[in-house]
Image: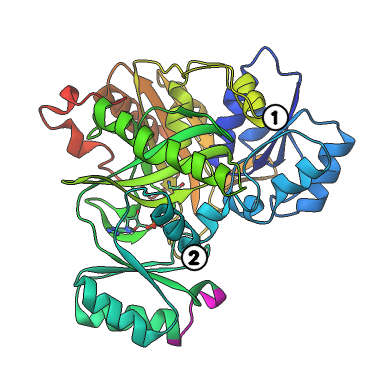
Amino acid sequence: MKVLVVGNGAREHALCWKLRQSPLLTELYCAPGNPGIAAVADRVPIAAEEVARLADFATEMRIDLTVIGPELPLTLGLADELAGRGLPVFGPTQRAAEIEGSKVFSKLFMDRHHIPTAPFAVVHDAAAARAEAKRFGLPVVLKADGLAAGKGVLIATDEDELGEAVRTLFEERRFGASGDRVVVEAFLPGDEVSFMALCDGERVLPLATARDYKRIGDGDTGPNTGGMGAHSPSGGLSAETAAEVVETVMRPAVAGLAAEGRPFVGVLYAGLMLTPEGPRVLEFNARFGDPEAQVLLLRLEDDLLPLLAAGAAGHFDARRLSFRREAAACVVLASPGYPGRPITGEPIRGLDRAAAVEGVEIFHAGTAMEGEELVSAGGRVLSVCALASDLRGALERAYAAVGAVDWPGKVYRHDIGRRLLDPGWEGVTGA
Ligand code: AMP
Ligand code: GLY
């Protein structure tokens, strides 16, 4: 099979790495890819947002399956464009991807289908936002409706922060039209985990549990990022609760989207808060998480290609997925300045030595070649990942490899998984 992967992050590198292992694969392309991806796929110089050009390429090359990584091409309708040309695609249509692209749609959808989530209201102006915030009490969460690169969620813990959040959304209009409609919702305290499933429009194949670390700083401090590390299993989510999430969140969401004429083919991602009252959905995404994909794909035993091809055809044959018993961990190396404006162009050396640490795989994100030299070229730059018999071992291997990466500017968290390594974490059975 000829496969095209769309995207250029470490998630897409992990997808290409995994697809490359399939005996069914004949040709693998990645648009636009990155220097790490170039080792396992042929790069195509078309950006992930260039919907028409990507569809032209897939048509000309008679691509048998296109796998879309990031949210932007999904919300721009790349899956629709490919399907319209009769080309198989694993990734939701524009209408199905609205579950990620619009917070208002997503919350109203959860309400219609009785999917557990935080109590909320949809508001259109500052006065209504203040009134609803008062009703819910502090802390309170305000979310701009549209995609805002993960920055459209504002948590206010006191009156000053609430005033500032309301000003940011309605006066400064920092998120532009994305902020015309705002979700105000109750703050849910608890432990946060990621739960994903492959979907074929009707059926769901749950992935193993995973957890990502969103804040830039150790101890969950500083601003939110795209994700600074991950591990699988997640810890904190028992097999029973995972089964409950499949029944109360994943299946109703996929059935609800199908019933509303938006069948969902692709990876459905639920960001969950584990509250004392049970799991609650904070958000849905319409794609693999990054860096969660990196650790999940390291643990996945099945051949990914026939699974995604069956999903694209609308009918999974498999009943369930198989994951290695080993744990996987990922530490993200970012550029100085991230998540603000990153300082780039710094040489990165020692990757061969780092990758030689047992169990380690390194996936590239923001890297580029300058002549013969690999340099940093974005915010998140490398995902340093490892498998081992348990989470402690996986983290030790990942951090040993991080130490071997010769890049003085590298910024990373030193505490990925640490909280779970307290005595007793091994008793946590991740699904
Ligand atoms: P979202 O993009 O909706 O997942 O929000 C980004 C982050 O904000 C989440 O990963 C949570 O850490 C936090 N968050 C969102 N909604 C809530 C909520 N209702 N209660 C507590 N934290 C939240
Ligand atoms: N790691 C969270 C996300 O991909 O949205």
Indicate the quadrant where residue 252 lies.
top left
Going by the numbered disc 2, the residue's amino acid type is Arg
- Quick check: is 280 in the magenta stretch? no
User: Which residue corresponds to mark 2?
Assistant: 341
What is the quadrant of the C terminus in the image? top left
Residue 30 place in picture, x, y as percent: 70, 37
- Residue 290, can we see it? no
Quadrant in which the N terminus is drawn: top right
Q: Residue at x 81, y 52 (%)?
A: 52
Q: Secondary structure at mark 1?
A: loop
Q: Camera-side residue: 42 or 258? A: 258
The residues bearing labels 1 and 2 have C-alpha atoms spaced at a distance of 29 Å
Ligand 1 quadrant assignment: bottom left
Seen as rendered, the residue at the extreme left is 423
Residues rendered magenta in the picture: 171-177
Q: Amino acid at mark 1?
A: Ala
Mark 1 lies on residue = 41
Q: Are marks 1 and 2 in contact (CB under 8 Å)?
A: no
Measured as percent of width and height from the top left, residue 32 is found at: 70, 44
